[in-house]
Image (cartoon, helix red, strand yellow):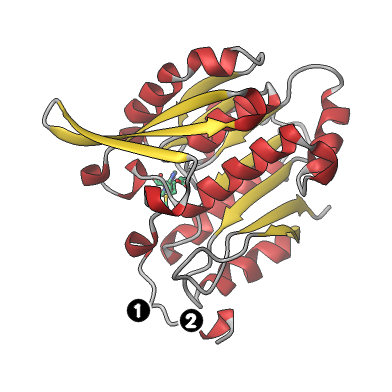
Amino acid sequence: MSNEEIDEDEINPFTMLLTDDQDHTLNSVTTVHEGTPNQQDHHHLRSIQSTVVIRQLPSEGLSFQLWPAATALVSLLDLHRLNPSQSPLSATLSAARATANDRPLKILELGSGTGIVGIVAAATLGGDVTITDLPHVVPNLQFNADANKEVVGSTGGAVKVASLRWGHADDVAKIGREFDIILASDVVYHDHLYDPLLETLRLMTLVSDDGKERKKMVFVMAHLRRWKKESSFFKKAKKLFEVDVLHTDSPCEGSRVGVIIYRFVGKV
Ligand SMILES: C[S@@+](CC[C@H](N)C(=O)[O-])C[C@H]1O[C@@H](n2cnc3c(N)ncnc32)[C@H](O)[C@@H]1O
C-alpha cells in the first residue's frame, strides 16, 4: 500500500505514540505528582554523554506527550554531533552557522509539546533555542527546560520558553524574527491547523518589517505521515517554499511509514 492510500480512520495518532519498548535509549518511569500521573523519560545523548529528562503528562492531552517524529529528530541531532560528515542535517546546519558567523545558532521551535527537540537542539548544537507552544502548554515546557538547564548549559546552549499561537501575527511580532532555523516535529495533523501554521511560517520567514530582503530562514520539520489529507498541507506549503526531503527513517515496528525530515526554504 502506498502512502497515498493510507486511510484517515486507519491510523490514529494516539495509537502511534512512541512507547519505551520502541526505543532502547528511552527509559520511562511513571509516578503521580500533585494528582496528575506523570512520566519521566530519560533520553541518553551519546554525543555529549549526558541524559535529558523529559516530563510527560499523558492525561493532560496530546501536547504533553512525546510524539514519534520528535524522537526521530532527537536521534538525528545526536548523530549529527557525533558524526557531522554523515549527517543529513549537515548542509543545512553548516549554511546556518555560516550566516550566524561565530555566534551561537538562534533556533525557534514551533509546537514544542514536551520541548524535547528544542532542548536537545540546544544541548547538541550549543544553540540559543526558544521553545514555544500554546499558552496552557508553557508551564510544562518551562518545567522541562529548567530540569535540563545544566545539561544544556554544559555545551554552551540555552533554552527560553514562550507562548506562540500559530496564525497570530502579534505573537510573531513579540518573539521577533531573528532566528537562523525553525524546527518542528509532528505539527501537521489536524487540517484546521494547516493554514495557521503556514501563516506563522510565512510571517517568520518571508515577511520583512522594513521592506528589505529577508535573510533565508530555514524550517526543518520532522513528520510522520498518517492521513491522505496531509498532501493538502504540502501542496499549500510548496506555493511558498521549496520543500526537500533531508532524511527518511525506516518505519518502526507495526508501522508502514517512517518519519521524514523535510527542509522548507522560502521562495523569493
Ligand atoms: C502532535 S503534538 C507534537 C508535539 C511535539 N512537537 C512532539 O513531536 O512531541 C502538536 C503540538 O502542536 C501544538 N499546537 C497545536 N495547535 C497549535 C497552535 N495553534 N499554536 C501553537 N501550537 C499548537 C500542540 O499544543 C502540540 O504540542
Is residue 254 in view from this perspective? yes
Identity of the residue drawn at 60% across and 23% down: 49
* Residue that badge 2 annotates: 6
Q: Quadrant of the N terminus?
A: bottom right
* Residue that badge 1 annotates: 9
Mark 2: which secondary structure?
A: loop
Q: Is residue 71 above or below residue 81?
A: below
Is 171 positioned to the left or the right of 45 in the image? left
Identity of the residue drawn at 57% across and 72% down: 232
Identity of the residue drawn at 41% across and 19% down: 147
Is 187 positioned to the left or the right of 208 in the image? left
- Amino acid at dot 1: Asp
Decide which of 129, 207 is in the foreground and name it.
129
Is residue 215 in view from this perspective? no
Identity of the residue drawn at 66% across and 16% down: 155
For the residues labelled 1 and 2, the Cα–Cα distance comes to 9 Å
Residue 111 lies, in percent from the top left, at 47, 43
Q: Is residue 4 above or below residue 11?
A: below
Is 43 positioned to the left or the right of 261 in the image? left
Residue 80 lies, in percent from the top left, at 73, 38
Q: Is residue 260 above or below residue 216?
A: below
Residue 110 lies, in percent from the top left, at 53, 41
Say if disc 2 is inside 8 Å of ligand 1: no
